[in-house]
Structures are given as structure tokens and as C-alpha cells.
């Protein structure tokens, strides 16, 4: 029997709401990717070139430490992977999550939230962190709309 995981990182709560909706629709297990050191408002200030997120995103090798571990990744066939877009890519904590598990043969369906930015180099950058995965293109989900999310999940869009 196929099992679905909805794993997400949310800095402000927007991605969390959409992840919860995807979990409800797919009946998938929900897993929040939590950083060891939570992000503060100052950390998230992309206007400040010395903010934590600005410095992390300038360094492609940055891998913020994850506070929690998923012990049963091998149980899942499909992983919906959610995150906000930062500097036209996924936050590096997402790369750390992907690099922490074996995604060989798993279908990964990334979704992202943003105030208006597109995916940029998201797909290319994420694929490097889990090359054995079966990747679907990243999808921007900018509102918690059950019909739109269901259409995407069911490949109607």
C-alpha cells in the first residue's frame, strides 16, 4: 500500500497551512521540518545583508541543523515537500532534509509559497540533494484553496 508524507518547513506559518491542507486531502502523514535554532523576525529580514537568512542563502553549502528526525522515511512512496522561496530557491534546511534520507525511487512533489517570486532555480538545486528521487516540478501554492490544491495533487492543473 502506498503511503504519503507531507514534509514542510514554514518560517511564518503560511507554508504550514498549505501543508496541513495537502495532508488532509491526501490523508498523508504530516512532518514539520524544524530548525534547531528557530528563525526570528530579524533572521528573516531579507533587506539586511547580514541577517541569518541572507548569510545562509549566500553560502550554497550552508545546511541549517534540523531539530527533529523522521524515523520511518522508508515507509513512504510519495513525499510532498513544502517550503517558502528564499532568493529564488528553497531554504537550505530543505537540502539538509533531503540529504538526510534515502529518496531513491520515491516521488517528490515540491510545493512552495512566496509573495510573488517564481521557482527560479529551485528544481535544479533540490534535485542535487536527492538524485535518486523521481522529481515532479515545484509548484507555487500561494493560497490555501482546497479546490486548487486538489487539482494540483490530482494533476488536473
Image (spheres, rainbow, N blue to C red):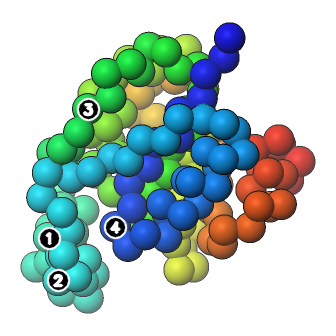
Q: Which of the labelled discs sits on residue 42, or is there none?
A: 2
Left or right: 59 with respect to 9? left
- The correct choice, above or below, for 139 with respect to 133 in the image is below
Q: Mark 1 highlights which residue?
A: 52
Q: Is residue 75 visible?
A: yes
**Dot placed on the residue nearer the N-terminal end, 1 or 3:** 1
The secondary element bearing badge 4 is classed as loop
Q: CA distance from mark 2 to mark 4?
A: 12 Å
Q: CA distance from mark 2 to mark 3?
A: 26 Å
Q: Which of the labelled discs sits on residue 69, or is there none?
A: 3
Depth check, mark 2 against mark 1: the one in front is 2
Q: Are marks 2 and 1 in contact (CB under 8 Å)?
A: yes
Left or right: 30 with respect to 12? right
Q: CA distance from mark 1 to mark 4?
A: 13 Å
Are there few (<14), some (14-19), or many (20+) residues within 10 Å of tag 3? some
Q: CA distance from mark 3 to mark 4?
A: 18 Å
Depth check, mark 1 against mark 3: the one in front is 3
Amino acid at each position: 500500500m502506498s503511503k504519503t508524507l507531507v514534509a514542510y518547513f514554514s518560517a511564518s506559518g503560511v507554508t504550514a497551512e498549505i501543508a496541513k491542507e495537502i495532508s488532509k486531502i491526501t490523508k498523508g502523514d504530516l512532518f514539520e521540518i524544524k530548525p534547531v535554532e528557530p528563525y526570528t523576525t530579524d533572521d528573516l529580514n531579507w533587506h539586511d545583508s547580514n541577517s541569518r537568512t541572507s548569510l545562509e542563502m549566500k553560502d550554497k553549502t550552508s545546511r541549517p541543523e534540523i531539530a527533529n528526525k523522521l524515523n520511518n522515511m522508508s515507509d513512504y512512496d510519495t513525499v510532498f515537500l513544502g517550503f517558502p522561496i528564499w532568493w529564488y530557491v528553497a531554504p537550505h534546511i530543505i537540502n539538509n532534509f533531503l540529504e538526510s534520507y534515502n529518496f531513491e525511487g520515491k516521488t517528490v512533489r515540491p510545493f512552495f509559497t512566496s509573495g510573488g517570486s517564481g521557482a527560479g532555480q529551485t528544481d535544479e538545486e533540490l534535485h542535487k540533494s536527492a538524485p535518486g528521487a523521481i522529481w515532479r516540478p515545484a509548484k507555487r501554492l500561494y493560497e490555501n484553496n482546497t479546490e486548487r490544491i486538489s487539482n494540483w495533487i490530482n494533476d488536473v492543473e
